Amino acid sequence: MAIIVQKFGGSSVADKDKVFNVANRVVETYKNGYDVIVVVSAQGDTTDDLLEKAAEINPNPSKREMDMLLATGEQISISLLAMAIETLGVPVISLTGWQAGFRTDSNCGSARIEKIDTTRMKEELARRKVIIVAGFQGLDKYDDITTLGRGGSDTSAVAIAAQIGAEKCEIYTDVDGVYTTDPRIVPEAKKLDEITFDEMLELASLGANVLHNRSVEIAKKYNVKLEVKSSFNKVDGTLVKEAIAMEKMLIRGVARDNDVARISVVGLPDQPGIAYKVFSKLAQEGINVDIILQSIGRNDEKDISFTVTKGHLEKALAILEGEKDVLRFKELLHREDICKISIVGSGMVNNPGVAAKMFQALYDAGINIHMISTSEIKVSVLINKDYADKAVQVVHRAFFD
Amino acid sequence: MAIIVQKFGGSSVADKDKVFNVANRVVETYKNGYDVIVVVSAQGDTTDDLLEKAAEINPNPSKREMDMLLATGEQISISLLAMAIETLGVPVISLTGWQAGFRTDSNCGSARIEKIDTTRMKEELARRKVIIVAGFQGLDKYDDITTLGRGGSDTSAVAIAAQIGAEKCEIYTDVDGVYTTDPRIVPEAKKLDEITFDEMLELASLGANVLHNRSVEIAKKYNVKLEVKSSFNKVDGTLVKEAIAMEKMLIRGVARDNDVARISVVGLPDQPGIAYKVFSKLAQEGINVDIILQSIGRNDEKDISFTVTKGHLEKALAILEGEKDVLRFKELLHREDICKISIVGSGMVNNPGVAAKMFQALYDAGINIHMISTSEIKVSVLINKDYADKAVQVVHRAFFD
């Protein structure tokens, strides 16, 4: 029997009515003749409530104990959803992450899945039971509970689909698919019927907030058919797949990311290896650097600017300040009043002029570009955050009107 | 290194301050040179909140899913308590029931412990870690989560102490020991320094609400030194042990139990086997019958009265009504406005006149006795619940003044 994996986020199971909405969807799929494995996150604000309880007691608890605490959120969801499905007269069983066979490394708080032993899930499917799995969690080699970090439930769902050979993995969310840009900013944003894994990866990392990167990476690696759809209506969603036959659109979407801060290291000696020294130190401390811009050296000096997430800003500045004697820069500047606007699309590979079209749209709107970064299927620019909405609107119009 | 097991109930970890109160106690014992294993229940109202969430969704959920849900309560407590102990600079690790090695039968909701694999606990103790174990829970042979039912955390604590050979098992509660009766009813109630397992068993089953029966049974079987003490002060508690050398007091305590209902089966044919028929059917359905009184047959008829817990009343009546054709009784009566008052003490075995002294005290106070039941170390009477407090007072005075 073909297997479908369905993933529902915390907002989709936030209260009794929503739990029953999900239960009905699941039962419908089951009654259409599928084996169904459901992955759920913690209900609505549960995780935040647990974090608050912990913060009250210990502002800096060990990650192991934090994972022990947080894992209860999903355990509550799975049992409640199973109880709801029981009332609909369909055989069902809930499984914690470890009961479902999730084995991870010991990196509590952001553990990586090492394997999924699907024995138990297969047994339950053979009994024609709907399986409800707690997303976001697993067990390490010491039998300690771990969590997978942000977007972990998406990752759990896709990993199950990959491992068990599901026909499809459906990611239910509060929007009904992947849009060409945020419909709250650009009302004429279009829903995409299809998107490639690579485009989705760029969009996800650009703050499109639909699917978590790790889940898309796994889906790409194991070629899992992925669909993003709404848990609140029955409209077709967006299919994420390996390749799309007809490249009708040059670009697939316009994304914005507000979680960006820029650091400028000014007046560095213009010597070989200086960029290496700056970035290796940051990498050692786990700081991801995004857009990098290096000025052309003059007067034996150069400047290096780059972006980090706002959460890493303070740490990055402290690290650089600590290395001042080694790096011998003159000044360390930073600003947070910026945002990143990106266009993504595998169609742009063979179409020169895509970047230029974006720059012109911004220029026509009087928006100044601070930094530029490009890849094969992406162009990103850094602009003042006050112009973020406007920038998304004009760029979207340039490509989709 | 000697091991001490300490058990803290839900009210002892209800909020941040109480969690730290417990953490400090635990750390003090640890610093006195003991290995410490702590068993905790779910915080304050957590279990009730979870039950309410479940009831909203499914008024009659499967016991398996209910246990999946309820087990999260203790998992939250153990991680929070561990986080609190971390701030005090002592190495600590929390373990769920199954991580601590609890294996039970599959009787979800009231599972029995089958064994405790102490490997992990011993490893953690060897690292000189304080261990925080989630009480009330275990894992069955299918790797499903089970709960032990009422008083389960007491049972978990005593079972660990028995299995791991602890020097002592301390049960912390909101009173500072076992009293001769409820101090809220009889202010002159005395705290007992010591009590035997058998006396404690009678008191526990009589509604003294201090220790759960199953925990006392295990303690008796494996001769675990048990101490009941307060989590809010440092007064010595009550030691529960095998035998007490000097039997200074005739009776050990006066207990009341309000959770009693009486059923009378009136006008049964006076034939052999009729009592067997009545009670075997009830036993099959899992209904515990307590005091039984059978009238002397006359006119070829007899009456049988007995007590059940209030929660079992409706079911018991339905069962008997369903068997009316077989039992051929005339009438089925019941009342709930009653309570049970008991005196307990191994001293009474060799002291005739103890029961008579109790009956006289009640007679002098004008309190009518509906039913009487006696064992070697116990006398129980059923009276109208309006006189419950008064009865406890006068009986206590008769023996302890």
Image (cartoon, coloured by chain):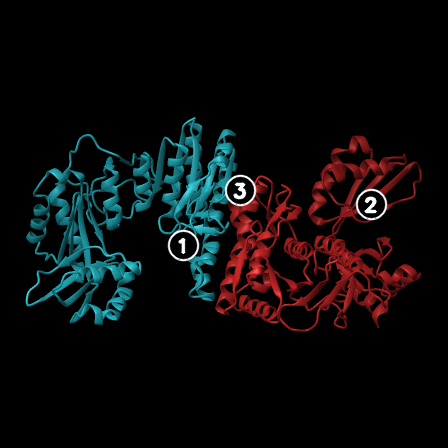
Chain colours: A cyan, B red
Location of residue A224 with respect to B362 vertically, above or below? above
| In the image, farthest residue toward the front | A272
Q: Which mark's residue is nearer the viewer, 2 or 3?
A: 3
- Can you tell which mark lies on residue B58? 3
Secondary structure category for the residue under label 3: loop
- Locate residue A162: give its quadrant: top left
- How many marks the image carries: the answer is 3
Pointers 3 and 1 within a single chain = no
**Can I make out residue A105 in this image?**
yes
Letter of the chain that mark 2 sits on in the rendering = B
Residues at marks 3 and 1 touching, judged by CB atoms closer than 8 Å = no
Secondary structure category for the residue under label 1: loop
Q: Amino acid at mark 3?
A: Asn
- Can you tell which mark lies on residue B305? 2
Where does residue B226 sit, x and y in percent of width and height?
A: 71, 62
Where does residue A81 sit, x and y in percent of width and height?
A: 47, 42
Secondary structure category for the residue under label 2: strand
Residues at marks 2 and 3 touching, judged by CB atoms closer than 8 Å = no
Q: Which mark's residue is nearer the viewer, 2 or 1?
A: 1
The image quadrant where one finds the N terminus of chain B is bottom right
- Residue at horizontal 68 percent and vertical 56 percent from the top: B158
Upstream in the sequence, badge 2 or badge 3? Answer: 3
- Can you tell which mark lies on residue A109? 1
- In the depicted view, which residue is nearer to us: B251 or B342? B251
Q: Amino acid at mark 2?
A: Ser
Q: Amino acid at mark 1?
A: Gly
Where does residue B280 sit, x and y in percent of width and height?
A: 79, 37
- Mark 3 to mark 1 CA distance (whole Å): 33 Å
Residues at marks 2 and 1 touching, judged by CB atoms closer than 8 Å = no
Q: Which mark's residue is nearer the viewer, 3 or 1?
A: 1
Where does residue B245 sit, x and y in percent of width and height?
A: 84, 66
